[in-house]
Image: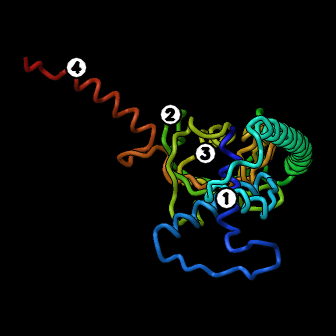
Amino acid sequence: MNKYPLAAAIALGLVLTGCNEQGTEQEKEVSLDTQEKKVSYIIAEDMAKRLEAQDVKLDPQVVLMALNDVSSGRDPRLSEEEKQKTIASFQEQMQKKQQEMLAQQEQEFKVNADKNLQEGKTFLEGNAKKDGVVTTDSGLQYKVITEGSGSKPSENSTVEVDYKGTLINGEEFDSSYARGEPVQFPVNGVIKGWTEALKLMKEGSKWELYIPSELAYGPGGAGGKIGPNATLIFEVELHKANVGDGDDSDKKEDKKEDKKEDKKEEPKTE
């Protein structure tokens, strides 16, 4: 027999200990002053939460009856054949319920994806007409807030930035400003919209990016507040175009060339 229903029964039995019949006794407060009691509470609480999450309903009086039967050594009230048939039917019902729940979630996800896609398209069409907004061939939109004077990152650069991300309704989903420190990451290791924008920005720049879903997280979304086909807005401040010893990306490439020349001129020591 499957162990799950038995474990569930034990959990509910522990939770309901002291309640022989519904409404006949008040729930007794038990002091959790020993390891055994604490472990009992933790196991019961965990199992009760699992059962509640799965919408499993058991009869408290029958649970206690089963616990008493086991502890007293009484013979089971159901045959093994009856148990197996009952559990098989129960599992079939649970699987059907889960399938229905998944189908509903998928439908809701699709509706949300279609809604986000249309709202994003409408937003970007209107935004493109605003003063200062530039639209690239890929569909990325940006607006220069502050133009820097440093070098631009390359595809392989690691940049340091501060940023704030919001949905088109203004809801914030992430911010390095809120955390109090900038972040570093490779230019080719982020969403397409960021990669494209960073390679256009000069060090010291601050831009506002408007990223269509196909250049962000697409139909899968990113979980949390970023749903499927979400259009995203980022305020990005580029502090360093290439994190390292302080040299910008162009100078760093020159240094690499200088090092190659130095190596050619160095005498062999062996």
Q: Is residue 255 above or below residue 37?
A: above
Tell me which residue sits at (46%, 68%) in the image.
Answer: 35
Task: Mark 2 or mark 4: name the one nearer the start of the chain.
Answer: 2
Residue 23, position as x, y percentages in the image: 82, 78
Residue at which label 1 appears? 67
Left or right? Give the position of 144 relative to 38: right
Q: Is residue 53 above or below residue 153?
A: below
Observer-side mark, 1 or 2, equals 1
The residues tagged by marks 2 and 4 sit, at their Cα atoms, a distance apart of 26 Å
> How is the model colour-coded?
rainbow
Task: Mark 1 or mark 2: name the one nearer the start of the chain.
Answer: 1
Q: Is the C-beta separation of discs 4 and 3 under 8 Å?
A: no
Instruction: Residue at the far front: name it.
Output: 74
Dot 2 amino acid type: Asn
Q: Residues within 10 Å of mark 2 (few under 14, many from 20)?
A: few
Question: Quick one: 202 or 90, which is closer to the camera?
Answer: 90
Residue at which label 4 appears? 264
Q: Is residue 217 above or below residue 29?
A: above
Question: Quick one: 23 or 81, which is closer to the camera?
Answer: 81
Tell me which residue sits at (61%, 40%) in the image.
Answer: 190
Residue at which label 3 appears? 201
